[in-house]
Amino acid sequence: MNLMDIITADLKTFMKDNDKFSLGVLRMLKSALQMEQINLKHELSDDEIISVIKKQVKVRKDSKLEYEKYDRTALVADLEKEISILSKYLPEELSEEEILKEIHKAIDELEATTIKDMGRVMKLLTEKIGNVADLSFVSMKVKEILK
């Protein structure tokens, strides 16, 4: 069963359970997935679906930070619930040690020595661990290592 089938099945379950909040979150996700499918003009692979879900989570995390600045606790709580619902569909993220290990492997493989090599290193890491790691964290660590 692919990820789209799982999301559709959960959508039906939330409808039957009358869980309006979760249903709304999955409808927004399904809409974003359909838009991506229209843009790419083909059925989405699991990796592409994960990428869309990560974008949705990132938008909500950014919004959460803004709402926290203005002490909008009700909205922050809703966004946290949305993030937890969406995160169920994402693969387990790598630990910091595993990420560092992959970074060092990529740097050794590409024989990168300076910050000028960062683009090549990040391209390789995005291909290898892009769906199981926070790329902003990876980028920060690569910068630290290649200084």
Image: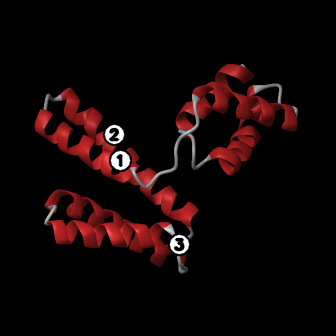
The one nearer the camera, 78 or 107, is 78
Residue 8 rendering spot, x and y as whole percentages: 36, 72
Q: Residue at x 57, y 31 (%)?
A: 95
Q: Which mark is residue 44?
A: 3
Disc 2, SS: helix
Q: How far apart are marks 3 and 1 (CA)?
A: 21 Å
What's the residue type where badge 3 is placed? Leu
Residue 88 rendering spot, x and y as whole percentages: 39, 51
Residue 79 vertical placement versus 112 (above, below):
below
What's the residue type where badge 2 is placed? Asp
Question: Disc 2 or 3, which lies upstream in sequence?
Answer: 3
The one nearer the camera, 96 or 119, is 96
Discs 3, 1 touching: Cβ within 8 Å:
no
Mark 1 — residue?
Answer: 59
Does residue 128 appear left or right of residue 38 in this picture?
right
Crowding at mark 1 (Cα within 10 Å: few <14, some 14-19, many 20+): few
Question: Disc 3 or 1, which lies upstream in sequence?
Answer: 3
